[in-house]
C-alpha cells in the first residue's frame, strides 16, 4: 500500500514540475484535481460504494473471499493514488484565492 501512495506522490511531483516550468498553477489545480477525482471514483466503484444495499449483498454472495480481497485491495490502491493529488489540488486552489 505504501507503493501506491508513492505512485500518487510521484504523479503529483511530475505535475508540479510541469506546472513550475510553465508557471501556470491552474494547470496543477486542473490536472491533479482530475487525476485525484478519477482515482477516487475508481476506488468507489471497486468498493461498491455507488450501488444499493441489495445489489451489494447480491454481489458479495456470489464472489469468493479471494475476489473480495482483490477488489478491496484495488480500491485501497486507487484511493491512495488519488488522495495526494486531490489534496494538493484543493490546497492550491484555496491558497490561490487568498
Image (tube, grey):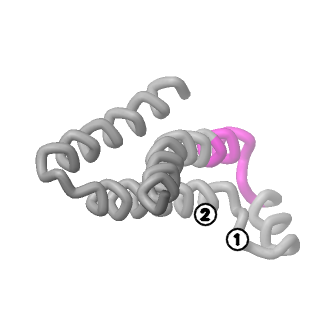
Can you see residue 39?
A: no
Residue 75: % across, % down? 60, 48
Query: Is 22 or 57 nearer to us in this picture?
Result: 22
Residue 67: % across, % down? 64, 46
Query: Is 9 or 19 nearer to us in this picture?
Result: 19
Check disc 2 and report its element: helix, strand or loop: helix
Q: Residue at x 85, y 64 (%)?
A: 57
Residue 72 figure quarter: top right
How busy is the neighbourhood of tag 1: few (under 14 within 10 Å), some, or many (20 plus)?
few
Check if residue 83 falls in the magenta segment. Answer: no
Residue 74 figure quarter: top right
Query: Is 67 or 53 nearer to us in this picture?
Result: 53
Q: Is residue 83 left or right of residue 63?
A: left
The N terminus sits in image quarter = top right
Check disc 1 and report its element: helix, strand or loop: loop
How busy is the neighbourhood of tag 2: few (under 14 within 10 Å), some, or many (20 plus)?
some
What residue did someone put label 1 on? Answer: 50
> How far is mark 1 from mark 2, CA to CA?
6 Å
Tell me if label 1 and label 2 are in contact, CB under 8 Å. yes
Check if residue 64 falls in the magenta segment. Answer: yes
Of the image marks 1 and 2, the number of the one nearer the N terminus: 2
Residues shaded magenta: 62-72
Q: Residue at x 82, y 59 (%)?
A: 61
Q: Residue at x 55, y 63 (%)?
A: 41
Q: Is residue 15 left or right of residue 29?
A: left
Can you see residue 97?
A: yes
Residue 42 sits above or below residue 13 on the image: below
Residue 88: mark in rendering: none
What secondary structure predominates along the stretch shown in magenta?
Answer: helix
What residue did someone put label 2 on? Answer: 45
Residue that sits furthest to the left in the current view: 21
Residue 51: % across, % down? 74, 73
Amino acid at each position: 500500500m505504501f507503493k501506491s501512495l508513492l505512485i500518487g506522490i510521484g504523479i503529483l511531483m511530475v505535475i508540479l514540475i510541469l506546472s513550475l516550468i510553465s508557471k501556470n498553477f491552474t494547470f496543477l489545480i486542473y490536472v491533479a484535481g482530475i487525476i485525484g477525482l478519477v482515482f477516487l471514483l475508481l476506488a468507489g466503484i471497486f468498493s461498491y460504494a455507488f450501488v444499493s444495499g441489495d445489489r451489494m449483498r447480491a454481489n458479495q454472495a456470489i464472489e469468493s473471499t479471494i475476489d473480495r480481497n482483490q477488489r478491496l485491495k484495488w480500491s485501497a490502491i486507487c484511493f491512495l493514488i488519488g488522495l495526494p493529488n486531490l489534496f494538493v489540488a484543493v490546497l492550491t486552489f484555496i491558497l490561490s484565492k487568498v
